[in-house]
Amino acid sequence: MSAPPDAHSDAPPTAAASADLSNWRTAPFHRWAFHHVDEIVPVAPIAADPTDPWPLPSSPRTLDGFRLNAGGGQTLDLQGFLDATDNDGFVVLLDGEIVHEAYANGMAEHTRHIAMSATKSLTGLILGMLAEHGVLDLEATVATYLPGLAATAYGDATLRQLIDMRAGVRLDPAQQQAYAAATGWDPPGDHPVDLHAFYAGLDAPAAAHGGPFAYISPNTDLLGWVIETAAGRPLADLVADLIWKPLGAVDAAGMTTDAHGAPRCTGGFCVTVRDLARLGQLMVQDGARDGVEIVPKALIDDIANGGDAQAWKAGEFAPAFPGMTMRYRSGWYIIDDEPQTLFAMGIHGQNLFVDRANRLVIAKLSSLATPFDFRAVHLTHRAANEVRRVLVGA
C-alpha cells in the first residue's frame, strides 16, 4: 500500500531545486520542502530507540464504501478525497492495526514531514507530563520561570493560559513580522534573529488573560523556553526520552529551531505519518504501551474533559466549526459530539484524529497550497467521520 522506497517527489524539479528559506512554505516549492525541512532550516533530532519499535500489524480493510459529498453534485471515493486534499501520507489504525495506508508526492513509510501546528499537541503532552512530575506548575506565571520577562506582555500569563490559548497578548503586524523572522522560518531581515530576543523585547499591550480562545502561535513557542528552563534540558531531548523512545517510534523525529537552537514547538515537529499514528494510538490506550504508562492517564483525561466550552464558543475559531460542540485543552481540540474525538491540526492540511471510544486513529500529512483551506478542513473532518462509518458503523 505504500510508495516504493525510491519514490521521487512529483513537485517540479525546478521547484525542488529552488526551494529555500524565502519560499519553502509557498507553492510549488512546499510540496518538496515539507518533507525535506532539514535542508531548509535547522532541525534538532528527536531520537528513537531502534531496539524497541512498536509494531503496527497490517490488517487491510476495504474502504470501498467510502463516499463523500464534495458539493456541486460531486461525490468522492477515498482516493478522490485524498487527491482533493493534497495528501502526502495517510494512515488509519483500528485496534492498533494499519487498516489503510496511502502515500503520494514522494512520501513513503520512513519519510519525515512537518506537522505544522499539530506540534502544539505534542508540546501540550510534554508540558503536562512535566507538571505531573512536579518539574513545573501550570498555574504559575511565565515570570516564575523567566524573570527577565516579568515586565513584558507575557510576564503575568500562566502556563495554563498559554497552552489553552487564553492569554491576552495580541501582536500588531510589525510584531507579527518580527516574530516570524525570529522563528527561523523566514529570512531575518532587520528583525531579531532568535525567539528569546523577540520575547525579551515584546512590549505589546495585553488584554486580561483568561478570556476567550485566541489562537496566538507565539504562546506555544514561549512555552518551549519555559520548558527548557524548568527542566534544564533541550526540548528535543525531553520529547525523545519522555515519549518518543518509550512510545516505540520507528524513526527519529525532529523539531525545527531558531538560529540559536530555541525550539519551534508551535509548529516545527517533523515526523513520519506512521509514527504520528503511533502517538494517536498511545492516546487511545490512555497513555500506556504494553501496560506501561508513558503519558499519565490523568493528563489524557484532563485533555478529554478539561478546557472551557464557553471560552471556545466565544473564541475566534468557533465559526470555522459550525454545529460542533468543542473545547481546546493543552494544545488539543476536543469535539464533544458522540463519539468524542480529540484532534491535532496544522496548516496546509496536517491532522491527527483520535477516537478513543472506537479505538480509531487517523493520521494525515498534506501539502495544501494555501495555509488555511477551510473547504479542505471541512472535507477532512467529514472524511474522518466517513472512515469511522465504513469501519465500525458509528
Image (cartoon, rainbow, N blue to C red):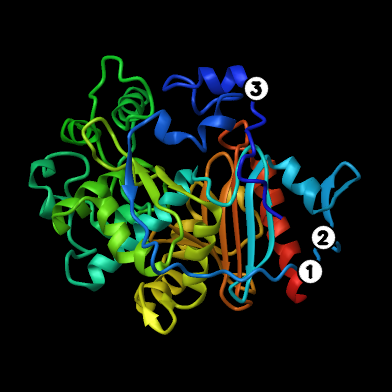
Residue at position x 56%, y 35% in the image:
371
Report the Cα–Cα distance between label 1 and label 2.
6 Å
Residue 39 point in image, percent of width and height: 42, 30
Q: Earlier in the sequence, mark 3 or mark 2?
A: 3
Q: Is residue 320 visible?
A: yes
The span from disc 3 to disc 2 (Cα, nearest Å) is 31 Å
Q: Are marks 1 and 2 in contact (CB under 8 Å)?
A: yes
Q: Report x, y in % for residue 129.
A: 29, 68
- Residue drawn 45% across and 67% down? 53
Residue 22 point in image, percent of width and height: 44, 19
Image quarter (top left, top right, bottom left or bottom right) of the N terminus: bottom right
The amino acid pointed to by label 1 is Val
Q: Please tell me whether mark 3 sits on a helix, a strand or a loop.
A: loop
Residue 12 tag number? 3
Residue 268, disc: none
Q: Residue furthest right?
A: 73
Find residue 341 and report its image quarter.
Answer: bottom right
Q: CA distance from mark 3 to mark 1?
A: 36 Å
Kind of residue at disc 2: Phe
The answer to whether the residues at label 3 and label 1 have Cβ atoms under 8 Å apart is: no
Per the image, the residue denoted by label 2 is 66
**Residue 193 horizontal side relative to residue 80, left or right:** left
Residue to which mark 1 is pinned: 390
**Which quarter of the figure is the C terminus placed in?**
bottom right
Q: How many marks?
A: 3
Residue type marked 3: Pro
* Foreground residue among 122 and 154: 122
Q: Earlier in the sequence, mark 1 or mark 2?
A: 2
Which residue is rendered at x = 63% and y = 33% of the image?
9
Residue 118 percent across, percent down from the top left = 47, 51
Within 10 Å of the Cα at label 2, are there few (<14), some (14-19), or many (20+) other Cα atoms? some
